[in-house]
Image (cartoon, coloured by chain):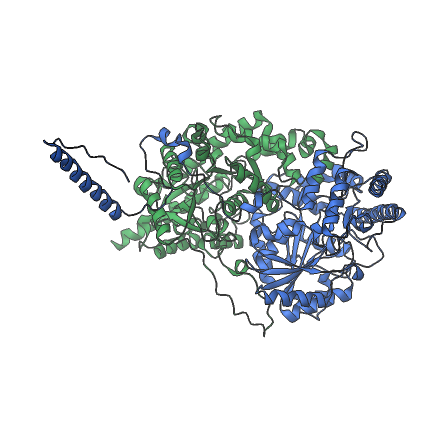
Amino acid sequence: MRLIVPLRGVIQGRGGLFVGSLIPCCLFYFLQLYLKRRRPPPSDPTELPRTSSRTNLFSRGNSIGRVRVSSRAVPVAKPSDSPYYIGLERVKTDPYNRITNTDGIIQLGLAESTLCFDLLQRWMSENLMESMMQSDDGEFDISSIAMYKPFEGLLELRVAFADFMSRIMGGNVSFDPSNMVITAGGTPAIEVLAFCLADHGNAFLIPTPYYPGFDRDIKFRTGVELIPVHCRSSDNFTVTVSALEQALNQARKRGSKVSGILFSNPSNPVGNILSRETLQDILRFAQEKNIHVISDEIFAGSVYGDKEFVSMAEIAGSGEFDKSRVHIIYGLSKDLSIPGFRAGVIYSFHEDVVNAAKKLMRFSSVPVPVQRILISLLSDVRFIEEYMTAHRQRIRDKHIRFVEGLKQLGIPCAESGGGLYCWVDMSSLLTSYSEKGELELFEKLLTAAKINATPGTACYCIEPGWFRCCFTALADEDIPVIMERIRQLRESSRS
Amino acid sequence: MGLPLMMERSSNNNNNNVVELSRVAVSDTHGEDSPYFAGWKAYDENPYDESHNPSGVIQMGLAENQVSFDLLETYLEKKNPEGSMWGTKGAPGFRENALFQDYHGLKTFRQAMASFMEQIRGGKARFDPDRIVLTAGATAANELLTFILADPNDALLVPTPYYPGFDRDLRWRTGVKIVPIHCDSSNHFQITPEALESAYQTARDANIRVRGVLITNPSNPLGATVQKKVLEDLLDFCVRKNIHLVSDEIYSGSVFHASEFTSVAEIVENIDDVSVKERVHIVYSLSKDLGLPGFRVGTIYSYNDNVVRTARRMSSFTLVSSQTQHMLASMLSDEEFTEKYIRINRERLRRRYETIVEGLKKAGIECLKGNAGLFCWMNLGFLLEKKTKDGELQLWDVILKELKLNISPGSSCHCSEVGWFRVCFANMSENTLEIALKRIHEFMDRRRRKEKMIN
């Protein structure tokens, strides 16, 4: 409200001067008040009046409001408080190198394998150019890689993936390329499925411990919640129907709508392989409750134990259950060690889900030149056989060494048959058998022993003291170094 | 208008044990039932081919740039392809390549993109590689920005006519609405302050919170650049309303004369005030200018630190393959190549544009005066029997079925005037373009003869 100080009228006489100025003042102020009440409020309290001088407006500085991002964007940029991410960040500041930085932090927190890079590198140097640039008549035709192609992936790639997946999952299950959608990695695969199967505010049941990345992959944008279903070491962390039942009932009491069950098999972080019976139990339960089942099988080709891997697709195809509720996630980041390429798969038995996922692939598809490389790679049956045999063997060898090294220190591991890591019971090193004690150990491992291992808390494990240790990027020589550091840590804790 | 259509979900009947899908999955916000996409189906079923199917449907509804393929081919074949695959390290670079999945994106590639974007703008604006966030295509970039700038049921103001894909890209998963800023031919479809204000008010009256304005510059489907004064007015408007400004500049390299393009980056370049700058975001991609839509390379360039940080993290859902980044980093850093490419590409597009506009003129058809892009905005209003949306769709259907040309009706672009059509000219050979023009000539001749007979 603009205050206009009225000029005092020049009126003869003292009293007159007083009255002569007071009355007009009062009248004026009442007029102002009246006019203010009649003026409509501005539509946006932060709106500024238009100015004719553009440079003046832009140089106003403090009087312009700071523009805001959406409320769903706010948590995304916040630094993560999960030990999973904290550990990964710390390694970057001082990464171990067995030649140039022997005192650095050894990375055991990233499930990646470099064990068969020699084989991949050889294949790439021999085949890459040809597989990407080749056309039908042998001449390079750029339109074969430059132009728009269906976002869900070239048919040849889906065929190659279907064949590849069938091979590595034991050959007892076949995959139909028309049920498949190729995604730019496992991350968008899980998010797209979440978008298709659940509404904002709905939930998935998820057995613990689970891969910390799911929190972001699923919650960031979809608004779908994850409800933990706690598993115990007494069951080797295998989910039971009674635990699922309990979790579902509790969720319903809270008014939460459960849309499905999400689990990984081989499981991450434990590394156990779910039995045929367990898979059937899960599917039967889902059918009873009329919810979806998502099986993340991204480590299916990284099975090194004696236990046979069975895909949920095999159970679904058996005819005993309604398969339209079954969806599988796969990708090449773990089994084929090429996370940088970004190639994942959504495989669904539900036609509408496949159709919706296909359309959503416009936001996350694989570049055509990369698809051509992958077609060539996955179709090279001889190479794939050689690679998968070596991959499994080398993981097995490394696993044996790593677990043996820990055993020597009196540190046991959970039984595992797949994955690129083991689930280590470090409870004997805890000062207190609690989450607090575990996080203290995590910090000590990171700072004193200079080892980044993912604590169970980050994976929502209900029993303290468990850590996931990824060993497939280690050379044999690194293992004694790690064991020695742990031994020293234990010594210094005792003293 | 611009409100998402939702199919009724079949009643969730646990007795049937049919498992339920989400609203996103069943909604038709993907828009693939609209004429824009229906024409594509007709093309897929009967595609034109110079030798094998000369009477097939010619695809003039896809904005793809094939005019400069030869330049790319030559570069990729000759210029040390091995090196370009893996970067300067050659094959040993494979190791890093295979593992690299950092959402920061390869530094060398971001530097190359920044330099390419600067070249396109003739050095009139600078781009900081650390403000570049990579996404798998501009489609993903636009969706990502929408997630970050707006909450469900908020709105973005978008000038009409606009790219039909926005209905899907900006709304489907995000739950955000589009409120149109109506533009018309009286001033060549330029955005006016009155139209902006009116759109804003429309949203407010419906209790919808406006979070930003999203423009495409050069415009799709108009094929024309946005004038500098309009950009200044837009920024002014966004500052006053305290909202964001997104400029999709995906066709910036396809402006026929470089001097005629003003990027919002140029406007922002001279502003120091962070509270003004930080509301501006640019989307770019290599799909149109470089003719590489198959590579899925897009970027968000933001002057807002928070948006850059957030977008980076969210880009995990839409990362660009490391192999692709390596391959393109060397190509885009090769300034000799990019300078030549940009120059020749502009020239060829200009000539194509002139060919089609002249050809249409001879047939008695006028186009909006354009200066950019891979398409022209054609006015067939005078051919409509009924000056309604239905009339326009009837004509579109005739053109598809009789002339076997798939073009895009203005109504699919939400144009407020009927009778306008977008016609793409860069995704075919010169011969094919001549054939298409011939079919149009013949059609117009037939019409004139028919009219003479009636009269």
| Residue B291, position as x, y percentages in the image | 54, 38
- Specify the chain shown as green: B
Counting from the top left corner in percent of width and height, residue A35 is at 23, 45
Outermost residue, left direction?
Answer: A12
Q: Position of residue A200 (x, y in %)?
A: 54, 57
Which residue is at the front of the view, A34 or A223? A34
Res B358 visible: no
Q: How many marks?
A: 0
Quadrant (top left/top right/bottom left/bottom right) for the N terminus of chain B = bottom left
Q: Is residue B318 visible?
A: yes
In the foreground, A391 or A462: A462
Figure check: B131 above or below A393? above
Residue at x 81%, y 40% (from the top left corner): A474
A260 displayed left or right of B278: right
- Residue A229: x %, y % from top left: 69, 61
Quadrant housing residue B218: top left
Residue nearer the viewer, A344 or B362: A344
Any idea which chain is the blue one in this picture?
A: A
Residue B375 lies left or right of residue B107; in this view the side is left
Left or right: B276 as drawn, with respect to A128: left
Q: Residue furthest right?
A: A408
User: Which residue occupies the extreme front position in the image?
Assistant: A14
